[in-house]
Image (spheres, rainbow, N blue to C red):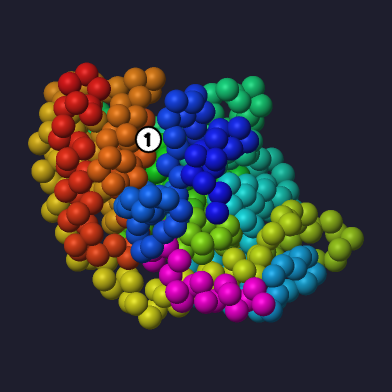
Amino acid sequence: MTSVPTLQDKDKRFLWHPYTQMQDYAQRDLLLIDRAEGICLFDHQGKRYFDTVSSWWCIVHGHSHPTITEKIRSQLTRLDQVLLAGTSHEPAILLAEQLVGLAPPNLSRVFYSDNGSTACEIAIKMSLQYWRQTGEPKRCQLVGIERGYHGDTIGTMSLGGVPEFHGPFAPLLFHSHRLPSPYCYRCPVGQEQKTCDCQCLQPLADLLVEQGSRIAALIIEPLIQAAGGMIIYPAKYLQKAAALTREYGVHLIFDEVATGFGRTGTMFALEQAGVAPDFLCLSKGLTAGMLPMAATLTSEDIFQAFYGEYAAGKTFFHGHTFSGNPLAAAAGLGSLQVFAQEQTMAGLPDKISHLQARMLRFADLPWVGDLRQIGMISAMELVKDKQAKAPYDFHERVGWPIYLAGLKQGLLLRPIGNVMYLWLPLSVTIAEIDEITERAWQVLSDPQNIAGF
Ligand SMILES: *Cc1c(COP(=O)(O)O)cnc(C)c1O
């Protein structure tokens, strides 16, 4: 084994980490993880950290669940990788069948890729090509939502609305329409819960009246805009958006890359609105966080628009080297098996209400402006002034001292800007929720960890 100081040194010399200011680690060591067990990570000294962010929102049943590792192991000795163009294999086929079984009935086709950004890019490209091939080539405009996040590729950044991340690339991004964020705590149209009739969707209604026949698709993260700041909004918003898009024949793309596989309390967030999209994008939790994989589900109508004589030029020319990789597909099958054998979804309501009860006391802290939760995701928005809801500037970096204090408490916390959150694996136990929320209280209730207090 290479020694820890040597690894730290080589890390500093050879690696460039994602979403990381590397200078922060010039005089400080990165958290070097040696192994994981259940919902905990362990460093080389054996110190334990609760993985409260599910390792970037993908761990579902805890780390290295034996059912899933066994599936991968047996697949590994049979077939490691094969192209999915003109070739197929059992895990990709059986997983597709199961995904179709879980999704709304109109979604009957699965197109694989290997990360969440590509799952969304594929939906966008399919929508555009669909309209081209069905006599409506003018439908080539797209609509996204402020604070939305669909990935870091050029296409998905063009539809996203997180300027803190995507600002530098503005000259490269293609034009798309942007709706206000359904940001209830800071309602863009000045409503409150009892007066809310999703008036923030009026710009969509107006846009459709003006240019409905030129719009290809609207892309939404159902129920929670995650990377944009854990912005949770009511299901009726999705119902209203779906009714509007349907009226004007516009495709609806649901990006459930983050919310898929139980995180919001239902298998997919869309179930809480009873809305079926034209495209459903899945990734993060698809393999329970074990291997990279993504899927874009769509309808038979859309599939049929690409079906025909080769010479007709309707083929969807898109694919990735690792589309439908057999090991990843085996992991996906393993995860769905765990959902069935452990009755994961049935166990959630108790955990969700327990988490909610444990988080309540945070709402009284003078720097907690808003406390919000959906399913196993609990978030709090930190403010400089509770009455005025005065936000911290992104550059004030209110999350940094919280992250550092979290490590001391044995928690891996990774606030996004001014939003501190827990994104818990579905396998978390009631006792672990108690321990995590108590440790988080130690961090969050101490004014020394809160900028300006
Ligand atoms: C993370 C995320 C993506 C991008 O997935 P990657 O695998 O990181 O490319 C897309 N959409 C949503 C909602 C996400 O949370």
Label 1 near ligand 1 (CB < 8 Å): no
**120 on left or right of 427:** right
Is residue 2 left or right of 421 when viewed as pictured? right
Q: What residue lies at 75% left-to-right and 68% top-to-bottom? A: 82
In the picture, residue 199 is in which quadrant?
top left
Q: Provide residue 442's location: percent of width, then percent of height.
A: 17, 40
The location of residue 115, given as percent across then percent down, is: 59, 52
- Magenta span includes 283: no
Nearest the camera: 72 or 174? Answer: 72
- Identify the residue shown where x is 65% and y is 65%: 324
Residue 179: image quadrant is top left
Q: Is mark 1 on a helix, strand or loop?
A: loop
Above or below — where is 62 with respect to 48?
A: below
In this view, the residue in front, 430 or 280, is 430
Q: Is residue 181 visible?
A: yes
In the image: residue 187, left or right of residue 152: left
Residue farthest to the right, as pictured = 311
Quarter that holds the N terminus: bottom right
Q: Which residue is drawn at 48% across and 59% down?
A: 289
The residue segment tinted magenta is 59-77
Q: Nearer the viewer, residue 129 or 422?
A: 422
Percent of width and height locating residue 313: 84, 56
| Mark 1 crowd level (few <14, some 14–19, many ≥20, 10 Å Cα) | some
- Location of the C terminus (image quadrant): top left
Determine which residue is flagged by label 1. 416
Query: Is residue 72 a member of the stretch shown in magenta?
Result: yes
Q: Which three-letter amino acid code belongs to the residue tagged 1?
A: Ile
Q: Is residue 424 left or right of residue 335?
A: left
Residue at 13%, 53% (x, y): give it: 357
